Image (cartoon, helix red, strand yellow):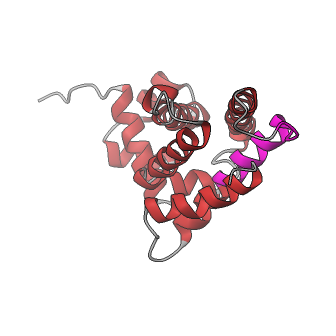
Amino acid sequence: MARAPIGRQQLLDAARDELVRGNGVMELGALTRRAGLSTGALYHHFGSKSGLLAAIYDAFYGGLGHAIADAHLPAEADWAVREHERTRRFVAYHFADPLAPVLLDRTALDPQLTELEAVYVQNMSDNAADNIRRGQARGQLPADIDPDSAGAFVIGGLRHGIAQQLRITPPPGPDLATERLWRPTAAALGIT
């Protein structure tokens, strides 16, 4: 009986599992054995191991972007209330995804992905800066804060802070982690 062709998503799922089990190390031989496929199928869908890892990054950061999108936040709330909820959603997303500690604790899973990861972080920082500008325009954040520096500070702090919270044994849970990360974020942005 012929095996049904393995699709792109099945390869992504198997690779994610392999990365989690291997704490960021993914050997193609182990991946192909676990998924029951040939390396040819992998190259057909992704072109290379780096292509597969790039697709995993895309899915992770795409999911994060969706989780923290404005559409999920209280539309009429003041800036601090909205951003507290965005922070809660940011933290909850990382706590719910077993791949998050691997991605946050490694500079990049593959040297070719360092630039890709830097682009994701820069985009998040730019979005945070734009968001800070909106808060300033509404008079809900101090006007003397540089939005670009503050956006980079907030995103960098959240990423490293979540990684630190995920390393605690046992982990504190997303609600406590959110509060631990929101307080220094709010302080840095002059929110009282």
Residue with the most extreme bottom position: 169
Of residues 16 and 32, which is closer to you in this image? 16
In the rendering, at what x and y percent does residue 163 appear? 60, 60
Of residues 93 and 118, which is closer to you in this image? 93
Q: Is residue 156 magenta?
A: yes
In the rendering, at what x and y percent does residue 188 appear? 76, 53
Q: Is residue 97 magenta?
A: no
Q: Is residue 136 left or right of residue 65?
A: right
Residue with the most extreme left position: 1
Which quarter of the rendering shows the N terminus? top left
**Is residue 65 visible to us here?**
yes
The secondary structure making up most of the magenta span is helix
In the rendering, at what x and y percent does residue 31 appear? 42, 46
* Residue 25, image quadrant: bottom right
Q: Is residue 154 left or right of residue 62?
A: right
Where is 114 relative to 1, above or below?
A: below
In the rendering, at what x and y percent does residue 45 appear? 46, 23
Q: Residue at x 49, y 33 (%)?
A: 59
Which quarter of the rendering shows the C terminus? bottom right
Q: Residue at x 61, y 66 (%)?
A: 164
Q: Report the span colored magenta.
A: 143-159
Where is 94 relative to 22, above or below?
A: above
